[in-house]
Amino acid sequence: MTPDQTAVSRRALTIATIAYAGGALAVLVVPSVADVFQAVHSWLHDGLGWRWVRPSFVDFPANVVLFFPLGLLAVLWLGRFWRGFWVAVAMSVAAELVQAVIPDRVASPRDIVGNALGAALGAFVAVLIIRARRDPDSDSV
């Protein structure tokens, strides 16, 4: 990659990371988003008759999925697993603190765990991508 291509790629990655982080925070703190998770739970529980489905069965995986791209982008942007991971976890904690003061939202340590798991998985994939880019002749990915 030429220096110009690297600068453009870096700029695009910075924009993508900031945009995704902003979108993720909006999803986490906007009260109406909780209605989407409630609707999915109601559909599974009442619509399909899956009475064993609890709201946490929808909420926890959603948190993992939401923070996977954030962990991946943050590590690609910052270049280190732990830096990207902790940035994502800090965002999760900040979002939960904001949720604690928003009516109709509930802050939960369980959400932070789901978010951290998603961020860790995304960060791990980012490390694999970084290693594969450093050694293009490697068969491991």
Image (cartoon, rainbow, N blue to C red):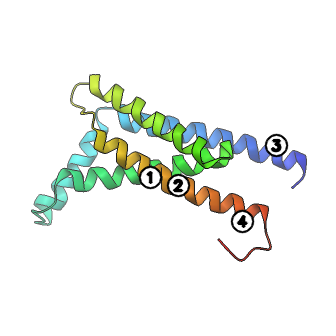
Q: Position of residue 19 (x, y in %)?
A: 57, 38
Label drawn at residue 122: 2
Tell me if label 1 and label 4 are in contact, CB under 8 Å.
no
* Residue where numbered disc 1 is placed: 118
Position of residue 137 relative to residue 106, above or below, is below
Q: Secondary structure at mark 4?
A: helix
Q: Earlier in the sequence, mark 1 or mark 3?
A: 3
Q: What residue is pinned by disc 4?
A: 132
Circles 1 and 3, Cβ within 8 Å, touching? The answer is: no
Categorize mark 1 by other alpha carbons within 10 Å: few (<14), some (14-19), many (20+). Answer: many
The type of residue carrying mark 1 is: Gly
User: What's the distance in space between the residues labelled 2 and 1, CA to CA?
Assistant: 6 Å
> Which mark lies nearer to you, 2 or 3?
2
Q: Nearer the viewer, mark 3 or mark 4?
A: 4
Contact check, label 2 and label 3, Cβ < 8 Å: no
- Sequence-wise first label, 3 or 4: 3
Q: Which residue shows up at 52% across the image and 40% down it?
A: 86
Q: CA distance from mark 2 to mark 4?
A: 15 Å
Say what secondary structure mark 3 lies in.
helix
- Where residue 45 sits: x, y (%)? 13, 59
Of 42 and 100, the residue lying toward us: 100
Amino acid bearing label 3: Ala
Asked whether, in this view, residue 49 is left or right of residue 136, the answer is left
